[in-house]
Image (cartoon, rainbow, N blue to C red):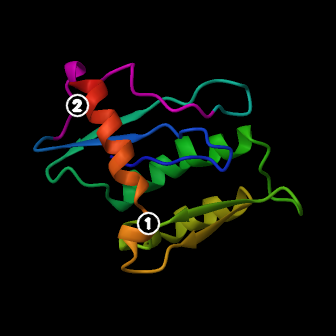
Amino acid sequence: MFYGRMGTGEALAPLVVYGGGCSVKPEWVSDEILGQSRDKNGETIPTLWRANAKGTVDAAMFQEYVKHVIIPSMQGAGVRDEDGHRGMFILDGCQTHLSDPVTTNMLNKAGIKLYTRVPNTSAVSQGEDTVIFRYVYVSIT
């Protein structure tokens, strides 16, 4: 699961990736798992449900998440490529997130600057992950 928050505290729509298959079964999808951020038209941005053999987020899925969740959420919050209106996207610096220049260019054109966390500091800088995943697990069981 790829999950995050806006600087305003609103939860972003997550990306849920199931392992062991190529498609998502309808019974695996839940309308209860939503983000709170909205696009520039005020519409709630939907959760992305995907599947692959490993259950991991690959570069193509990350690009899709940026295109369909990150950029619309930021635009809904007023971010644009103008002085005083740009946004920040802070994430871990794994290869999946940084390997495709198309993704980083999309962010840049939308006025979103990409920043990575300090390597090997997940226990300090991502402590929130255990709280978020615990909440989602309880919600779907």
Dominant SS type (magenta): loop
Rendering coords of residue 4 (x, y %):
49, 48
Q: Is 7 in front, or is 30?
A: 7
Is residue 68 in the magenta section?
A: no
Q: Residues within 10 Å of mark 1 (few under 14, many from 20)?
A: many
In which quarter of the view is residue 136 placed? top left
Q: Residue 24 got which mark?
A: 2
In the image, is 111 to the left or to the right of 106?
Answer: right
Is residue 23 in the magenta section?
A: yes
When the figure is inspected, residue 109 is found, relative to residue 80, above or below; the finding is: below
Q: Amino acid at mark 2?
A: Val
Q: How many marks?
A: 2
Magenta-colored span: 22-37
Q: Which residue is mark 1?
A: 97
Rendering coords of residue 131 (x, y %):
37, 46
In which quarter of the view is residue 110 placed? bottom right
